[in-house]
Amino acid sequence: MDIASPNMKTLSVPAELVPEWDLLLQRCRDASLPLADVMGQANQFQSQGLGVLSCELYRAWLAVQHGPLRVVALYNLGATLASNQAHEDAEQAYREALQIKPDFLQARVNLGHQLEHLGRLEEALATWQEAANDRTTGEIMGTDPRELRLHALKNRARLLEQEKRYPEAESVMREALELKADQGDVLQHYVHIRQKQCAWPVYEPVGAVTTNQLLLNTSLLAMLSYSDDPALQLLVAQRFVNEKVVKYSGQAFHRLSGLNRTGKIRIGYLSGDLRMHAVGFLTPEIFELHDRSRFEVFAFCWSREDGSAQRARITGAMDRVIPLQGLGDEAAAKLIASMGIDVLVDLQGLTSGARPNILAYRPAPIQVSYLGLPGTSALPGVDWILADRFVMPPEYLPYCTERPIYLDKCYQSSDRQRPVGATPTRSQVGLPEDAFVYCSFNNNHKYTEQMFAAWMRVLQAVPKSVLWLLADNDRARENMLAFASQHGVSPDRLFFAPRAAPPDYLARFQLADLVLDTFPYNAGTTANDCLWMGTPILTLSGRSYISRMAGSLLTAVGLSDLITFSVSEYEQRAIQIGKEPARALSYKRYLNEYGRSSPLFDMPALVSNMEAEFERMALAERKT
């Protein structure tokens, strides 16, 4: 028997269920089937993967029932349709329920989700605003309406942030926190959205929220931008792991596979960022240069297919690409284990879109963190991290759960084939021709009040100097201009570059005299890019891996005198170079003559170094 709703796939009723199904339909038609029985049977169908039957059963019951329970059936129909991705039908079910009961907050909140799925974002935002404004008292189907209003506010804030409407999103987060202070997920986004807007101080209490709550609920990414204290970074990583990562204590999946690992060593790269992304820009040559006589190279990824040449180049460099989209974490770990991977390199850590649960099941005997998270992830199952002795000095090791695999020179990979656009003139990008141009093209969330104040003091000390910045959003730009004015710097000395395609972004670096690094979240890919383009970068190196990244690159390229170790030294060096433009030119000449032949960009040596370490570890593991 075949049945179908307008927006769902036709599904055949299994032959063994046909008699039961016919009886259920008959009981619906003669109004003898209680709603409780409909709900129980629908749940059973759903658990068997027969969602269409669940929906059609509710429809059959609703066709003849018009009593007070109709609104409950409509709500359940909407939820079932939504779980089966029939969002247009779900929308109609929720709307009919709301016609019967306009104060049905659960239905209104869920209606917003369907509208979002359908791409009608403004309608979704308006629907959640209606739910947030509702002042119904008393429980609704066993749920406190206050919690439903909070749910609506959080979804509204999430979508606004996703759409980069940061001031609106922050306002909604504030409203939610005034309703209830103890909301870790909202606090986490509130802190980071203030960083994105350069809204200083970042820790601004709201309602009953305390500064301590803001600190304790700061995400790892936000903490890396906020504090150079490696103990705080470790604390935040451990909190995430304790709250979010599966607690698996069984036997490692790679042992359960029972495979006898022989032949070529199998390296797997695990990531959702093998595309137009910082990780995707730094890694292609690693994959291309692996020695295929000794290694097989796999990508286990859930990267978005962005259709880019970069994505095609990455996938083309792999021996096998195994997509993990639609596969649960445990199933993904079993798949990886079944393929006999010797070394699994995690390129994501705890960054956005990460799937740390896969690693918790230990699908490979050697699991290594690299590039995606420049610091400790505290993830169970990740025992190693690729590093060099500059980014991971002995003083940092107590704050890192992973053990270092030290590479001989610099930890960071490079791409010597990155395409570069035509060099523009200063006038074409709106810069003064005769100024000393400091620049920082790091993401705005890396800008901090402390370092921005230092930059303003540098501008004050160096006549005819300007600062060329990236502005991710209008509010960040407004806040930076206001901060400059408050610190005695004319806003017309700040220039803002829009986002650009990678080749054009690279070409722009040649117009700057000196790149000013951020702290504590140093430039990573950005530092690599500016040095490749022959523009020097001044950095401040601190105590943590992430605050020592640019220092590692400068050491490898041969410009260690551009590494400073205090804010005052950083300021003094920036001022010295700004007052002596010939010094900046000498750095540029050095980079143009020797930079690309330096150890920083010696990719064959880096890959060979990595392979030697992986081979040593894998062969030792195979003997156990």
Image (cartoon, rainbow, N blue to C red):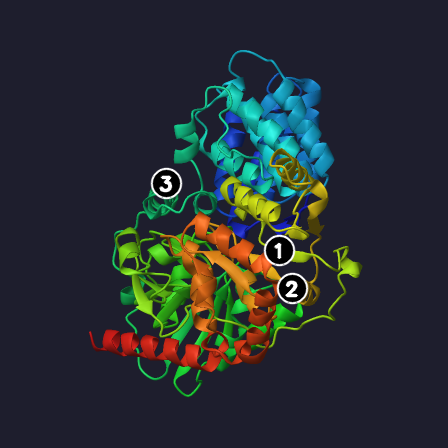
Q: Which amino acid, by three-letter code, is at mark 2?
A: Phe
Vertical relation: 406 (above or below) 356: below
Which of pointers 2 and 3 lies earlier in the amino acid sequence?
Answer: 3
Q: Which amino acid, by three-letter code, is at mark 3?
A: Glu
Q: CA distance from mark 1 to mark 2?
A: 8 Å
SS state under label 1: strand
Mark linked to residue 439: 1
Q: Which amino acid, by three-letter code, is at mark 1?
A: Cys
Q: Are marks 2 and 3 in contact (CB under 8 Å)?
A: no
Residue drawn where x is 60% and y is 22% of the image: 105
Mark linked to residue 243: 3
Count the marks.
3
Q: CA distance from mark 3 to mark 1?
A: 39 Å
Which percent across, then down, holds residue 214?
A: 44, 32
Task: Pick out the residue farthest to the right.
Answer: 428
The residue under label 2 is 509
Depth-wise, is mark 2 or mark 3 nearer the camera? 2
> Residue 26: in sight, yes or no?
no
Q: Residues within 10 Å of mark 2 (few under 14, many from 20)?
A: many
Q: Are marks 1 and 2 in contact (CB under 8 Å)?
A: yes
Vertical relation: 232 (above or below) 178: below
Which of pointers 1 and 2 lies earlier in the amino acid sequence?
Answer: 1
Residue drawn where x is 31% and y is 82% of the image: 262
Q: CA distance from mark 2 to mark 3?
A: 42 Å
Residue 426 image-quadrant placement: bottom right
Which percent across, then down, holds residue 65?
A: 65, 23
